Image (spheres, rainbow, N blue to C red):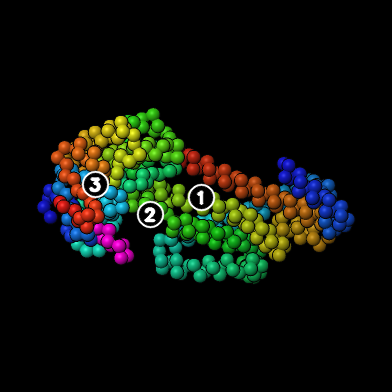
Amino acid sequence: MTVAGIWLAVWEIAAICVGEGILLPRVEDTVSALIRTGAKSETWLSVGASVLRVTGGIITGMLTGCVLGAVCAFSRFLDDLFTPLVTVIKATPVASFIILAFVWIPVNLVPVFTAFLIVTPIFHTNVFTALKNTDRNMLELAQVYNMSFIRRLTEIYIPSAAAAFTSALTSSVGMGWKASVAAEVICRNRQSIGGGLYSAKISLDTADVFAWTVLVVVLSLVFEKSAIALIKRAGARRNGDG
Amino acid sequence: MKNEIVARLENVTVKFADREILKNINLTVGKTDRICITGTSGKGKTTLMRVLTGFQQVTAGTVQTAPVRTAVVFQEDRLFMHRTALGNLKAVGIEKERAEKYLNAVGLGADMKKKPSQMSGGMKRRLALARALAYGGELYVFDEPLTGLDRETADRMLELIKKETEGKALVMITHDEFALRIPDVRIVKINADDEKSALI
């Protein structure tokens, strides 16, 4: 709270120094805009629609990235096949994907597709690296003790990749939100947070832009913390037997 | 290979780069043999164990092993850090009742719900030993299973090893003082003086 207070104070002082709300609104103006925006029912419809799109993109990207990372870790051929593709996806500007997706697929799916493309390489890289670095000693142990593939997966590979998975999740939630909202702004999705941002921008209502941004940051943080809490809970339940 | 032989090493040599770790080792392990491998550290004892368990390729010589169930205590404990003591045994397919029996036998009955991170070095070693004994087999390969244990506990664990491996093949790296207390034991000394050649 102290840290948040310091940064809010920095923001307020900077806004007073600038003296132009259109360039940098004051904290109280942003809070007012946030309350005003939050009071409208259509805001929550937009938030709901954006949450659905982001969630869809992150979950599909997460599953695809994990599967891709795992198969690439176990198969040299698949690694050679998919790694160039993942490298291209990583290096391509998000805006290029958004514009191309805008041409290729229905506008409502563009934010989903964008989040998917951002999240997939993050999970692929993290899961691939974690599996490649699985403790060889434990794999030898599994061989000696005739552990089945399922047991090796649950007792060695998954615990080995768990930290990398959590790290990937932390990065991808924030990145997914950024990319998805950017897609909504460019595609001007009607019922979306990006749509709200775009409307605020064309009416030069900077406080409103800040209010929508604060909303995205809060939602992203809630998503991230909830996902990590879920993973921890699942891990604790799995290991509960002793 | 005769039925009563579970492993046979003939003129086995292992080199890492230009360094000769084992030279012309001959070792025959019968189905009820008790063999202790002793010698100063860094002389290839663990490499010999790895050859026996099939994890080390040999540079020269032949290795023959019968397809028997083998229980191993590695030089490192190799525990599942996310599991409790009980979970470490269950993770390799050991039934709960059997796991509890062996955890009690090694003196970890009161610590079954502790994770390895909450255990001392000696407790972890006993957990690795409990896992191997509970798993059971026709061949037991133990790499310094008594390391890190106080004298009294080491004595108890040695008695347990003797009892549990009776009538089975046992190959164990350990100190002379423990080796000499195993009945009908064959002691194999590996050291630099005889050019790492074992006299079996």
Closer mark to the observer between disc 2 and disc 3: 3
Front residue of this view, candidates B68 and B147: B147
Neighbourhood count class around disc 1 (C-alpha, 10 Å): few under 14, some 14–19, many 20 upward: some
Q: Amino acid at mark 2?
A: Arg
Q: Which residues are magenta?
A: B14-22
Does the image show residue A222?
yes
Neighbourhood count class around disc 3 (C-alpha, 10 Å): few under 14, some 14–19, many 20 upward: many
Against B72, is A23 above or below? below
Q: Position of residue B47 (x, y in %)?
A: 28, 54
Closer mark to the observer between disc 2 and disc 1: 2
Q: Position of residue B56 (x, y in %)?
A: 28, 57
Give whichever of discs 2 and 1 has the lower sequence position.
2
Closer mark to the observer between disc 1 and disc 3: 3
Against B88, is A46 above or below? below
Q: Which residue is mark 2?
A: A136
The rendered magenta stretch, by its main secondary structure, is classed as strand
Q: Which residue is mark 1?
A: A163
Seen at 12% across and 55% down, the residue is: B1
Front residue of this view, candidates A183 and A3: A3
Q: Is residue B19 magenta?
A: yes
Q: Amino acid at mark 1?
A: Ala
Measured Cα–Cα span from mark 2 to mark 3: 26 Å
Q: Amino acid at mark 3?
A: Thr
**Could you tell me which secondary element the residue under label 2 belongs to?**
helix
Q: Position of residue A171 (x, y in %)?
A: 60, 55
Measured Cα–Cα span from mark 1 to mark 3: 40 Å
Quadrant including the N terminus of chain A: top right
Q: Which residue is mark 3?
A: B38
Q: Quadrant of residue B181?
A: top left
Seen at 34% across and 31% down, the residue is: B107
